[in-house]
């Protein structure tokens, strides 16, 4: 791959452009928002000049509802020989592409499963996709050369490719991404009705549960609308669980002792199933007892170490251990931070945002 175009300079589009530019790919940036485009260019993500010939691949980094029309427009203008997108829903954009008569043989649906709470080009990172899953959804009519080009894109961004069909992808992200975001937003919305002293008491648990609610509301409404067919049934099942939980709590408040015992057993079972579901994530991502060691470069060991620990605390991450430099080590010797695998990436991002060099 020598040339690429990224259409849409938000967090994901600019991060892809930064990764490609960093690997020597001439990357052209396109966006209707001149300020977003200007910021992406200032970040070094690419050039705002249009390509003189079709690029090797064009990445359509726009909301799901805009993918088909954007793709059709750029195919008409022969922007690229191969196209992919990064929308977090795949079935609806594909159906709309077919309806608009797009050349789907040169299109590979894509979805990098990476992001941050903050949006926009200023939050972009060239390493955003390192070791993250990147789903590709080729179809029977997809040209092999188009799929190979999309796989090359994933490789250049440091991600791990996963091939799925569009419907399977949409069911999966409805469960592990879209429903959790909706629940985080609904939970965070309760804070609007809370008393001020209650909000001030909010600790790490509430922060963790509501963290992803900070995402762009307009974008997430677009995503949920595009995947309503997959999210709706999950929400109905969750509603049934909430109703069952509310009934158990009501019985614990008002019912006779024998009914209270049954209600407590029911509530315990609901919570137990939650624990078992959470354990499946640890199993899917490897040994839950394993730790990840992050290496952080320090200057003056005393003052810098204090500041590092303060920044770790600000990131709301618990350290499992620390590896200090041996006596007599150079002043710039790194410190090792031992953390649970699931928090290694968030802590790395938080520390890098504060200026630390983390490996």
Image (tube, rainbow, N blue to C red):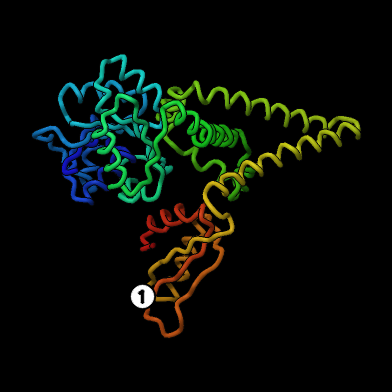
User: Which of the two residues, 351 or 87, is positioned nearer the viewer here?
Assistant: 87
- Residue 31: percent from the left, percent from the top? 23, 32
Residue placed at 31% from the left, 38% from the top?
10
Task: Tell me if 3 is positioned left or right of 280 in this view.
Answer: left
Residue receiving disc 1: 332
Extreme left residue here? Answer: 52
Q: Quadrant of the C terminus?
A: bottom left
- Circle 1 sits in a helix, a strand or a loop, which is it? loop
- Residue 344: percent from the left, percent from the top? 47, 56
User: Which of the two residues, 203 or 99, is positioned nearer the viewer here?
Assistant: 99
- For residue 262, above or below residue 124: above
- Residue 198: percent from the left, percent from the top? 64, 43
- For residue 333, above or below residue 23: below
Q: Quadrant of the N terminus?
A: top left
Residue placed at 31% from the left, 14% from the top?
99
Quarter of the rendering containing residue 260: top right
């Amino acid at each position: 791959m020598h040339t690429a175009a990224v259409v849409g300079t938000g967090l994901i589009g600019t991060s892809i452009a930064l990764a490609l530019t960093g690997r020597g790919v001439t990357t052209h940036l396109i966006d209707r928002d001149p300020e977003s485009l200007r910021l992406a260019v200032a970040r070094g993500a690419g050039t705002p000049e249009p390509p003189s010939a079709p690029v090797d691949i064009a990445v359509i980094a726009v909301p799901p509802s805009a993918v088909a029309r954007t793709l059709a427009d750029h195919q008409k203008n022969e922007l690229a020989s191969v196209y992919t997108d990064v929308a977090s829903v795949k079935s609806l954009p594909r159906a709309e592409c077919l309806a608009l008569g797009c050349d789907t043989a040169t299109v590979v649906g894509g979805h990098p499963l990476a992001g941050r709470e903050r949006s926009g080009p200023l939050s972009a990172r060239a390493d955003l996709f390192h070791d993250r899953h990147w789903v590709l959804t080729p179809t029977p009519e997809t040209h092999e050369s188009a799929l190979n080009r999309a796989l090359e894109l994933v490789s250049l961004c440091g991600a791990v490719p996963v091939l799925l069909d569009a419907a399977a992808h949409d069911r999966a992200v409805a469960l592990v991404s879209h429903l959790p975001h909706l629940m985080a937003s609904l939970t965070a919305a309760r804070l609007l009705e809370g008393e001020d002293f209650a909000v001030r008491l909010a600790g790490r648990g509430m922060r963790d549960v509501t963290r992803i609610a900070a995402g762009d509301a307009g974008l997430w409404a677009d995503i949920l609308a595009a995947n309503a067919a997959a999210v709706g049934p999950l929400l109905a099942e969750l509603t049934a669980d909430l109703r069952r939980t509310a009934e158990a709590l009501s019985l614990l408040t008002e019912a006779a002792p024998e009914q209270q015992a049954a209600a407590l057993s029911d509530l315990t079972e609901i919570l137990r199933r939650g624990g078992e579901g959470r354990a499946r994530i640890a199993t899917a991502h490897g040994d839950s007892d394993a730790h990840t060691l992050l290496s952080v470069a320090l200057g003056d060991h005393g003052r810098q170490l204090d500041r590092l620990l303060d920044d770790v605390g600000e990131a709301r991450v618990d350290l499992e251990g620390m590896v200090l430099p041996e006596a007599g080590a150079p002043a710039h010797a790194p410190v090792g931070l031992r953390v649970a695998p699931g928090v290694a990436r968030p802590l790395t991002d938080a520390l890098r945002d504060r200026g630390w060099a983390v490996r």
